[in-house]
Image (cartoon, rainbow, N blue to C red):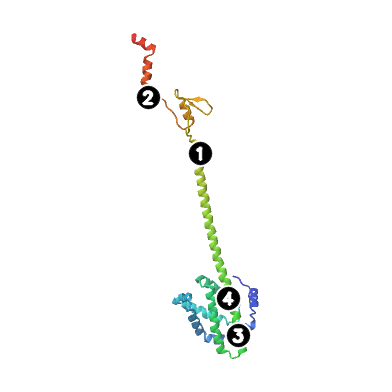
Amino acid sequence: MQITDLEILRRRGFLQLTADDDALLNRCREFIGAELDQIVTDYLAAQAGFEEMAAFLRDEGVLRRLRSAERRYVLGLFCGHTGHSYVTDRLRIGLVHRRVGIAPQLYLAAVKTLKDIINRVFERHIADHERLHRTALALEKLIYFDITLVFDSYLRSLLSEIDQARSSAESYALSLELQVAERTEQLEEKVVQLERALAAVKRLEGVIPICGVCKKIRNDKESWQQLEQYISEHSQALFSHGLCPECYQRQMRALEGLPGDEEDKTS
């Protein structure tokens, strides 16, 4: 996120965070620094009471880094300005919270805890009630300023993840669509091939009128066709002609009875 000086001023204006507020907080820097270790210790002890945070704090490495980061954060509240380095640090906090999975409600609870601890430090070091009230109010405005920055980066990070997930889902859906289209095209080709094969197949079915003597078949045009011709036209069958044993004997006997045969025998 690129937040300009104008945007920083605009956000400060929303919260009525003034230069006087910066100065009031900056005057507290010395005694806050003196009690910084105790502030951070009390803060982390309070966080350990939340089950979700306790899981993080059980890791010594995480605890050490968190303690160091919290020290920097607290001191930053009393640096007397909200320039680009300050804003960048707060934006980074939002990204870290999103990356490690700390929910917004836990962050808000943690911020309130820290504010209460610092206010108790104010009460011990600021005797003037008017100044104490104004300083506590300045801290509250600055913490709200921080929250807007943290939530901006947190939400932008979340939206970025959603966009990436949607993009991945759309890419996956597109790949499925292409696969379905390809399979559909293949199936359509198969259907065409089957239809062509079925169109090429001719079937004989139903009642076929056939002569009981010569075995000719009456076709749709009321003409009589030889059996072989009719079947060939209505199927893929082809015929080869020969003689069965009975016909062979019958034909041979018929040939033997021809007139020419008797003359050959006499001679």
Local secondary structure at mark 1: helix
Q: CA distance from mark 4 to mark 3?
A: 18 Å
Give the residue at mark 2.
244
Residue at 56% x, 63% y: name it. 163
**Mark 4 or mark 3: whose residue is earlier in sequence:** 3
Alpha-carbon distance for marks 1 and 2?
38 Å
Give the residue type at disc 3. Thr
Q: Quadrant of the N terminus?
A: bottom right
Task: Identify the residue at image location x=60%, y=85%.
Answer: 135
The residue drawn where x is 53% and y is 57% is 171
Query: Marks 4 and 3: CB-CB under 8 Å?
Result: no
Nearer to the camera, 233 or 104: 233
Which residue is situated farthest in the left direction here?
266
Q: Earlier in the sequence, mark 4 or mark 1?
A: 4
Task: State the mark number for residue 147.
Answer: 4
Q: Which residue is mark 3?
A: 135
Callout 4: helix, strand or loop? helix
- Give the number of the mark in front: 3 or 1: 1
Identify the secondary structure beneath mark 3.
helix
Q: Which mark is residue 236?
A: none
